[in-house]
Amino acid sequence: MAGFSMKIYPDNAVIMAPLAGYTDLSYRRSCRRHGCFYAFTEMVDTGSLVYSSRNTRKFLDRGAEEEWLGTQIVGCKLNEIEKSIEIINEHDFNVLDLNVGCPTPKVAKKGKGAGLAKDPEHVAKIIELMVKKSRAPVTAKIRIQDTTDPEKTVSLAKKIEEAGAQALTIHGRLLSAIYSGTCYADIISAVRENLKIQIIANGGVMDKDSYNKLKVDSGCSEIMIARGAMGNPWIFEEIKNDKSVIPSTEELANELELHIVETIAYYGENFGCKLCRKLILDYLKGRGFSGEFKSGVVKLSTVEEFKNFMNDLRKGPTERYKKWLKKNSNLQFESFV
Ligand SMILES: Cc1cc2nc3c(=O)[nH]c(=O)nc-3n(C[C@H](O)[C@H](O)[C@H](O)COP(=O)(O)O)c2cc1C
């Protein structure tokens, strides 16, 4: 509420970003096993929530053990947003966030997500409505609007602050950059200096070093992690202890197996197995597994096949993984040989 501002996140909070197609209950559980506390559901399209699918409502599921959970809406029509908040209010969330950053053409071209940023007045109207209707505190997530001049991003951020949002996450990349290239932390820093509400920096955190760098460059104490946690929930431990964490093959397999079992239990074999294929590839990525081993993953389609795959994985480490580990961490390698 205006004039009654409390910080949403404590200093140095590390926040797991909303990731469409990923941050469901089993995904968050995997991150939480490694120390993640602040997490979001996937983005929830207000149209789908109001007009149709049971699947979208599933996005709002909250595990009994989840102490802190935010949700995020993506939409632009005020009537739809109002109705979706009524549905969301039946649930318990710590934050309701507005997505002003999604670059997917079918979202942004319809004036939703990153497409909203073209009309800051309308963003302000949405935030005002959210503040009026939502049980949970309201926040927003935007992208930078220019890579050299902070003015446009500052002015969008100010509109959001004035409309009553209590915190703002800034992804330091343009809409046109999608998810690649430099994260312009200096623009985030300029916004932070011009706003009163809490600013959370996001973009390019893949390990403790990039985390520390984003903190310094943006001046923000609160950081949001996205792709850095995909297939690597250990990043939360790594950041907490400021010490590299490279899981052993057994740790990798144990975590992956739990994640798979929970995903299949949550969605059923059909959709669950489909999701698990991409999860496995994330876990194997960049860890030195052979292309041949990875190419087997796309064929997995039953629980039985997943079990066999996990057995193969446990037989590791492969020679390549061993070499990769040796190159990356001599200490960890000792325990394998
Ligand atoms: C697969 C995928 C799904 C995403 N889904 C969402 C989403 O639902 N809501 C959102 O605000 N951002 C979403 N993002 C953007 C991330 O939250 C984050 O802003 C972006 O990836 C930059 O951070 P990073 O460089 O640490 O990955 C998504 C990104 C990816 C790669």
Image (cartoon, rainbow, N blue to C red):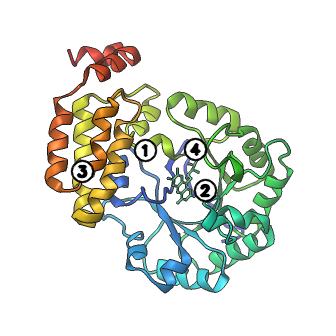
Instruction: List x then y, in percent, for residue 220.
Output: 66, 42
Mark 1 vs mark 2, foreground winner is 1
Ranked by sequence position, the earlier of labels 2 and 4 is 2
Q: Which residue is mark 1?
A: 230
Give the label on residue 7, or none. Answer: 2
Spatial separation of the CA atoms under disc 4 and disc 3: 36 Å
Residue 253, relative to residue 277: is it above or below?
above
Label 1 close to label 4 by CB (< 8 Å):
no
Instruction: List x then y, in percent, for residue 229.
Output: 44, 43
Q: Residue at x 43, y 74 (%)?
A: 56
Instruction: List x then y, in percent, for residue 168.
Output: 66, 56
Spatial separation of the CA atoms under disc 1 and disc 4: 16 Å
Asked if the residue at label 1 sits under 8 Å from ligand 1, the reply is yes
Query: SS class of the residue under badge 3?
Result: loop
Spatial separation of the CA atoms under disc 2 and disc 4: 14 Å
**At label 2, which amino acid type do we have?**
Lys
Residue 218, relative to residue 156: is it above or below?
above
Mark 2 vs mark 4, foreground winner is 4
- Along the horizontal axis of the image, is 66 left or right of 314? right
Ranked by sequence position, the earlier of labels 1 and 2 is 2
Residue 299, relative to residue 246: is it above or below?
below
Label 2 close to label 3 by CB (< 8 Å):
no
Residue 257 in view: yes
**At label 4, which amino acid type do we have?**
Ile
Q: Which residue is mark 3?
A: 300
Ranked by sequence position, the earlier of labels 3 and 1 is 1
Query: SS class of the residue under badge 1?
Result: loop
Mark 4 vs mark 3, foreground winner is 3
Query: SS class of the residue under badge 4?
Result: strand
